[in-house]
Amino acid sequence: MNKYCLLFFFLLAVKVSFAQVNLMSLDQLDKRVEQGKDTVYVVNFWATWCAPCLKELPNFEKLNANYKNQPLKVILMSADFKSKLEKVVTPFVKHRKLKSEVFLLNEQSEQKYINRVSKDWSGSLPATLIINKKKDLRKFYEQEFSYEELEKVYLSNN
């Protein structure tokens, strides 16, 4: 195999190692959660323009890495406008080398999805939803998490 083939495979491997960003509706998220009955879902709502969101993103990445062998699924759900997917969100994810699953929220009405996620959500970011179907648990947090706080919340809902 020549050096150009090796370079191509290396670049392909590097590209695949970063999270791909796709659109996801709340209906699709619900279906996903239904399929993973023994999985704890930690869904973080964030945006590229939200300073507290950006500060806490590494904590979700660390939780994902530290508990990768557990039935945990960290989903980073961007609340950026759909028009920002290719020019802002995808480059942001690649630049930050995010490994968790990243989606851009695909909903028409902000107020409808806010109410659907939690009646307690004012709409502020960051916000996090913990879902554990096995325990019939759904908890919502409208706050920024330190790693220690996030880990404690995950473990207490696991």
Image: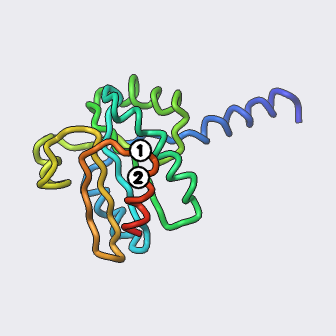
Position of residue 114 measured from the top left corner of the image (x, y, whole percent): 16, 47
Q: Quadrant of the C terminus?
A: bottom left
- The residue lying at 50 percent from left, 45 percent from top is 61
Q: Nearer the viewer, residue 158 or 132?
A: 158
Q: Amino acid at mark 1?
A: Ser
- The residue lying at 57 percent from left, 55 percent from top is 66
Q: Nearer the viewer, residue 65 or 150?
A: 150
- Relative height, residue 52 to residue 22 (above, below): above
- The residue lying at 39 percent from left, 73 percent from top is 37
SS class, disc 2 = helix
Q: Quadrant of the N terminus?
A: top right
- Label 2 neighbour load within 10 Å: few <14, some 14-19, many 20+: some
- Relative height, residue 71 to residue 115 (above, below): below
The part of the image, by quadrant, that contains residue 103 is top left
Q: Is residue 95 left or right of residue 112?
A: right
Position of residue 99 measured from the top left corner of the image (x, y, whole percent): 54, 44
Q: Nearer the viewer, residue 36 or 63?
A: 63
The part of the image, by quadrant, that contains residue 38 is bottom left
Q: Which mark is residue 146?
A: 1
Q: Is residue 143 left or right of residue 112?
A: right
Q: Is residue 71 left or right of residue 22?
A: right
Quickly name the residue at label 2: 150
